[in-house]
Amino acid sequence: MEVISLQSGSSGNCVFVRSGDTRVLFDAGISGSKAQSRLAACGYDIRSCDALILSHEHSDHISGVGVFHRKFGLPVYANQRTWNATRSRSATGCIGSPNHFVSGESFQIGCLRIDPIRTPHDAVEGVCFVIEDSKSGERFGLLTDLGHAFDGLAEVISSLDAVLLESNYDDRMLRHGPYPRYLKERIAGKAGHISNDDSAELLDAAQSDQLQWACLGHLSAHNNSPEVALTTHRSRHQDRFPLFCADRDGATQLPKIQRTKVAKQASVACR
């Protein structure tokens, strides 16, 4: 399985996953031209993707959805409430009928089984994803915009071979930073984002020996930095597994995931 973060952060999010002949994009928070050129630089044609799957309706995840659909011909997948909220934000333009999935119920695209897990993030019905190759068993978690480290999340991480995990802010930088009080409270609240410490604690709690790598994602531009995030994590994990940071303004091509151990299964009830 191959994972490329085309961008990850508050200014835009888009992740490419390929396994076998199946190619899927998650979220469309960047322009079509950026997605196309960044994928091409990694050797892929965006028009060959089988689907565009939306996690929630915030603009940094949906701003390009209309272009991705009309220009590149990508079928759009979303749960019903997310799709209704996306349309109400007038971000889509003219789109045919989307494909609706149900949060908490897996669905299949090619060889990929996709499990959308409901999150307490402040969206109408936000989800994160576990993506599994139904033939080889390789499991990847795309776990961002989480709200908080909700029950069962560490168990999900324990079942994965690799994860792109939110590590949005440093507590001290947020506390002393330029944001107004209401925004600081929203970010650090139960429906906002998780901090470097929260993220490191989740990976610690997972205690998995099958994790091939972890990539920190959705870093804040003002309340975090790759250096601070990596330092916080390495102080907890040492060298248990390779650790990366997804670029806020460009593509990050991550190591290929190869199944070496039998996966544990984990599920989380919808929230």
Image: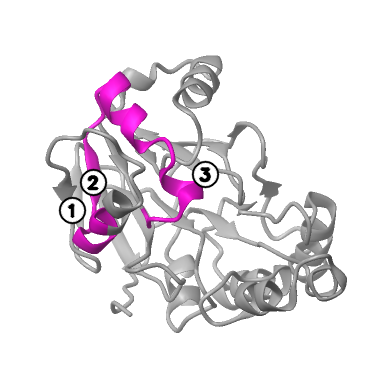
Type of the residue with mark 2: Tyr
Q: Is residue 168 above or below residue 247?
A: below
Residue 79 is one of the magenta-drawn residues: yes
Q: Where is mark 2, residue-wise?
A: 77
Q: Where is mark 1, residue-wise?
A: 107
At x 52%, y 17%, the residue is 37
Marks 3 and 1 in Cβ contact (< 8 Å): no
Marks 2 and 1 in Cβ contact (< 8 Å): yes
Type of the residue with mark 1: Phe
Q: Which contiguous range is marked in magenta?
A: 55-84
Of the image marks 2 and 1, the number of the one nearer the N terminus? 2
Image quarter where the N terminus lies is top left
Q: Where does residue 128 sit, x and y in percent of width and height?
A: 40, 61
Separation of marks 2 and 1 at Cα, in angstroms: 10 Å
Residue 17 is one of the magenta-drawn residues: no
Q: Secondary structure at mark 3?
A: loop
Separation of marks 2 and 3 at Cα, in angstroms: 16 Å
Given residues 223 and 251, the one toward you in this image is: 223
